[in-house]
Amino acid sequence: MIVNRKAKFEYKFIDTYTAGLVLTGSVVKSIRQAKFSLVDEYCYFEENELWMNNIKLLLKRRELKHLQSELATSAYTIIPYKIFETDKGIFKMEIALARGKKLYDKRDIIKKRDIERELQKKT
C-alpha cells in the first residue's frame, strides 16, 4: 500500500472515491515494489477522462461528471491519496476531492499534535 501522508495535512478532504487503474509498463513494476510516490501528484481531466501522470483512473460516469462540475465551479482539486491492491490482485486508488488548507489551519494541527505528545509523555 502506498499512501500520500502529506495529503491530510495539506488538504481538507471533501469527498473520497475509489478508482480503478489502467497502468502501463514500468508503473506496474514500481507500484509492486512500493517505489512509487504520490506526494506531488494531482489528477486532471483530459477529454472527459480522469488522468494522473500517465495513469488512467476508472470511475463511474456520474462520479466523473460530479467531479468535473465541482472542479469547474469551486476551488477544489483532485488528489491521489492511497494506492492499494485488492484480494484479486487488482490495483485501486483512493482519490479525494479536496480544498487546500490555509496556513493557520496547519498551525492549529501542529499545535494540537504537540499538546497530545506532551500529554502522552506525562502519562
Image (cartoon, grey):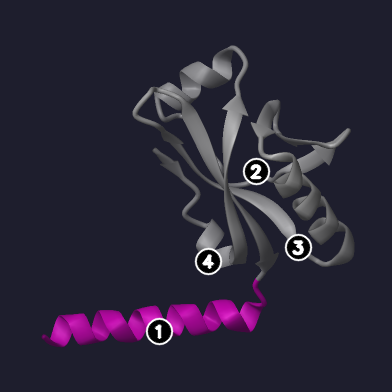
Relative to residue 58, is residue 110 drawn left or right?
Answer: left
- In the rendering, at what x and y percent does residue 17 appear? 58, 50
Amino acid type, mark 4: Phe
Q: Which residues are magenta?
A: 101-123
Task: Please indicate, yes or no, whether residue 17 appears anywhere in the rendered image.
Answer: yes
Residue visible at 45% across and 29% down? Answer: 35
- In the rendering, at what x and y percent does residue 114 appear? 35, 81
33 over 97 or under it: above or below: above
- Give the Cα distance between marks 3 and 1: 26 Å
Task: Say if mark 3 contacts mark 1, CB within 8 Å.
Answer: no
Q: Which mark is residue 76?
A: 3
How would you rate the neighbour count of disc 4 (Cα within 10 Å): few for under 14, some for 14-19, many for 20 or more?
A: some
Spot the residue most to the left: 123
Task: Say if mark 2 contacts mark 4, CB within 8 Å.
Answer: no
How would you rate the neighbour count of disc 1 (Cα within 10 Å): few for under 14, some for 14-19, many for 20 or more?
A: few
Amino acid type, mark 2: Glu
What kind of element bears circle 3?
Answer: loop
- Give the Cα distance between marks 2 and 4: 15 Å
Query: Which callout, 4 or 1, points at the residue further toward the start of the chain?
Result: 4
Q: Which mark is residue 112?
A: 1
Query: Which image quarter is the C terminus in?
Result: bottom left
Query: Which callout, 3 or 2, points at the residue further toward the start of the chain?
Result: 2
Residue visible at 66% across and 38% down? Answer: 59
Task: Say if mark 3 contacts mark 4, CB within 8 Å.
Answer: no
Give the mark toward the camera: 3 or 1: 3
Q: Which residue is mark 4?
A: 9
- Give the Cα distance between marks 3 and 2: 15 Å
Residue visible at 88% across and 33% down? Answer: 47
Task: Please indicate, yes or no, whether residue 36 appears anywhere in the rendered image.
Answer: no
Q: Which residue is mark 2?
A: 41
